[in-house]
Amino acid sequence: WPDLCGLRVPTLHAHLDESGDLNFTPRGSHYYTFAVAWTYNPSLLAQDLTGLRFGYLKTGIDLHRFHATEDQQRVRDAVIARLVMRHDWWYAAIVIQKRKVNPSIREPEQFYPKFATMVLRFVLKGCLRRDTDQVLVFTDEIPVKRQRDAVKKSIRVACRAELRPRIRFGCYHHPAASNTWIQVADYCCWAVQRKWERNDARTYDQIRSRLFKDELNVLARGTTEYY
C-alpha cells in the first residue's frame, strides 16, 4: 500500500495480459486468452522474481524478463515455484474460441476492448476489498496507437462503470520487462492457453491454487462458426 500524507491507502494492482494470435483462419490458434493477475501487495513476489532473475544472470543465463513461451523449462519451473509460494494474489481468465468470433469484431481495435474488459470487469465487480481506495491497471506496451487508445478507453470505461465513485483509478501501458507483475500475468495466461490449445494442463495445475475461479469460455453457447 502506498503511504499518502501519512495514510495507508489500499490499492489494487491489476495486470492484464493475453495469449494467442489474431489469425482468424484454420492456420491460427484455436483460442485466444485474456488473464488478469491482481494483488494488494505487489512488492514481495516482485522481489522474489527479481532475485531469481539476478541469480540466473550470475550463472550466465541472459534474462531481461521472464516470458513463459520463451523460458527454458527449468526456468519456468523456478518461476512457478515462486508464484505458488506467495498467497496474497489471484488470477482470473477468459478464453475465446476464435472460429465463433463474428468477423465484424476481429480487428484489434474492436477485439481487444470487447474481450479484455470482460475479465477485468469480473475482478472489479467481485474481487475488491471494501476498503479499496485506488485501482491501478497495467498492460504490456501496445505499439499501435489506435489499438492502445482503444484499449485504454475501454479500461477507463470499465473502471468508471464498476468502481464506486470514491475509488480512484489509473491505466498504464508498461514494457513487460519493467513490471514483474505483467510477467506474472503472462505466466497465468500462458498456462490457461496451453490447457485449451494443446490439452497441456501441467502449468495450469501447478498454479491452480492462485486461480480465483475457473476460466470462462465466453462463446461456449454460440452455435455459429465462421470458418
Image (cartoon, helix red, strand yellow):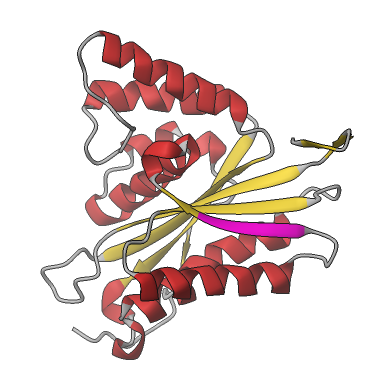
Residue ID at (27%, 26%)? 63
In the rendering, at what x and y percent does residue 56 appear? 29, 15
User: Would residue 192 appear left or right of 158 to someone viewing this image?
Assistant: left
Tell which residue pokes out farthest to the right in this image: 6
Residue 187 shows in this picture: no
Quadrant for the C terminus in the image: bottom left
Residue ID at (39%, 46%)? 175
Numbered-mark total: 0
Confirm whether the magenta stretch covers residue 92: no
In the rendering, at what x and y percent does residue 188 appear? 43, 43
Q: Nearer the viewer, residue 101 or 18?
A: 18
Residue ID at (42%, 68%)? 148
Q: Is residue 184 above or below residue 222?
A: above
Q: In this view, does 124 lie above or below 130?
A: below
Q: In which quarter of the image is residue 224?
A: bottom left
- Assign the magenta stretch its main secondary structure: strand
Give the extent of the magenta segment.
Answer: 168-172
Confirm whether the magenta stretch covers residue 170: yes
Q: Which of 124 and 203 is in front in this view?
A: 124
User: Would residue 24 appear left or right of 173 to someone viewing this image?
Assistant: left
In the rendering, at what x and y percent does residue 201 appear? 33, 42
